[in-house]
Image (spheres, helix red, strand yellow):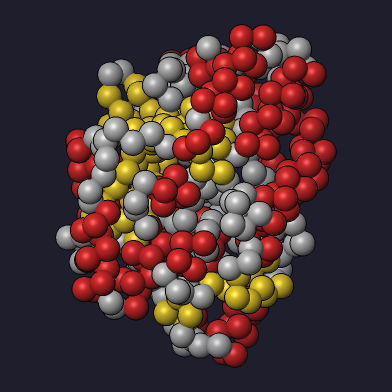
Amino acid sequence: MRQFAGYGVGVNVIVDHPFCPAGWSRHAEHRYMGPVESDSMRYLDRLLAIGKSDPGQVLLPTSDELVWLYTSNASLLARYFRLYQPPIETIRRILDKALLEKAAATAGLAVLPSWDPQNPDELAALAPDLPYPVLIKPRTHVHRLRNDKGVVVHAPDELAAEYPRFLARERYRFDDMPRTPDSVRPVIQKFVEIGREGVISISGFIARSADVFVTRRSTKILQRSRPVGVGVCYESRPADPALSQAVHRLCRELDYFGLFEAEFILHDGAWAIIDFNPRLFNQIGLDLRRGLPLPMLAYLDALGETGAMRALAAEAQDEDPAETVVFCDNFTLHAILLAQTLCMRAHLKDLAHWRGWAKRNRAHMVHFASDHSDPVPGIIHVLSEIYLGFRAAPRFVRTMLPSSPLVARELLR
């Protein structure tokens, strides 16, 4: 939003609750109240009403839910909006984790070993020979009523207990959207602990024409929850041409265009892809600070301003490999450290490490929501996190119990 304002482009935002930081930005020209994204039919009706009253706006999704909503209702939304969405089959292959893995393998990318048992008998046959630990992973996050990333299990008997439990509690709101018969069934994937190298993120933009492609590389060094979760702290990394070209091949295989973030984890000496986000993403401010104006590139391509888009992308190709930039959700970082301290899980050297990291990187740190020129979203973010923290406290404490696997242990040492 702030980047668009720098280019003189107005931004409108739909908010579903008072604690939405973007709705409080001084750069938001209009703030439309709307339902939650998961209430897809009401959300679509609200979008169509907005588009009818102010046609010609460009839609850029901020979640998997909105990616699917925009794509599956493209014919309706195109009456009033300028859409910038790949074909529905492309999006289906991205948002379904099993289909994404197949596409990545076809494109020559390394993938983690995974299994897709079709029924209890197949699961029982697989269980004794799986390379534990394994992750019971949602096939898609679209329409899910839960926010978790999956469940890690360490033995066949644990898998036999957790898999049906996971399946039973997976509830989706698919009454108003097309689905495949296996949408609710999770996949099983080899679980790899995060080492010192962290999770690599290749983020960037590929134009409709596919010949404009620009990326940045970063590393997720701390995540919100264990064993898997949303990133809290990231560090910039110099370009890795091989990984960038791998992502380009994947985009071509998927027939994808637009903004993206691809995540990789080191497994058996190779960087294996674990996710692909076809939308705006959490730490996009890190790329903006490093000279990659992702939202503006998508906006220009959506408008058909090809010359301006190409010129901007050419400027963004020049990256300073020595530049150090970090991203931090500062409030959440300190909340995690406090919670670990209260649960007696934090070591003094861990606390000293992260406090030292924050102090050392203060001059070149990009914050999740706060900015000196636009401070109110940062305040709202803190209030929102406090509210959500109280709601999530029991689950967070459970992840801090001694019996829980510590995925981020290496990151804290």
Is the residue 308 above or below the residue 392 in the image? below
Answer left or right for 42 relative to 319. Answer: right
Q: Does any portion of residue 42 appear in the rendered image?
A: no
Quadrant of the rendered image containing residue 265: top left
What residue do we see at 74% from left, 24% from top? 338
Q: Where is residue 293 in the image (x, y as percent from the top left)?
A: 37, 58
Q: Compare residues 63 and 141 and report the one nearer the observer.
A: 63
Q: Compare residues 143 and 333 and report the one nearer the observer.
A: 333
Q: Position of residue 219 (x, y in %)?
A: 41, 32
Say how many tags the image has: 0
What residue do we see at 47% from left, 37% from top? 364
Residue sitting at the far bottom: 53
Q: Where is residue 16 in the image (x, y as percent from the top left)?
A: 71, 65
Residue sitting at the far left: 211
Answer left or right for 84 relative to 240. Answer: right
What residue do we see at 54% from left, 56% from top? 63
Q: Compare residues 334 and 20 and report the one nearer the observer.
A: 334
Q: Does any portion of residue 220 appear in the rendered image?
A: yes
Quadrant of the rendered image containing residue 177: bottom right
Q: Where is residue 23 in the image (x, y as percent from the top left)?
A: 67, 65
What residue do we see at 46% from left, 49% from top? 284
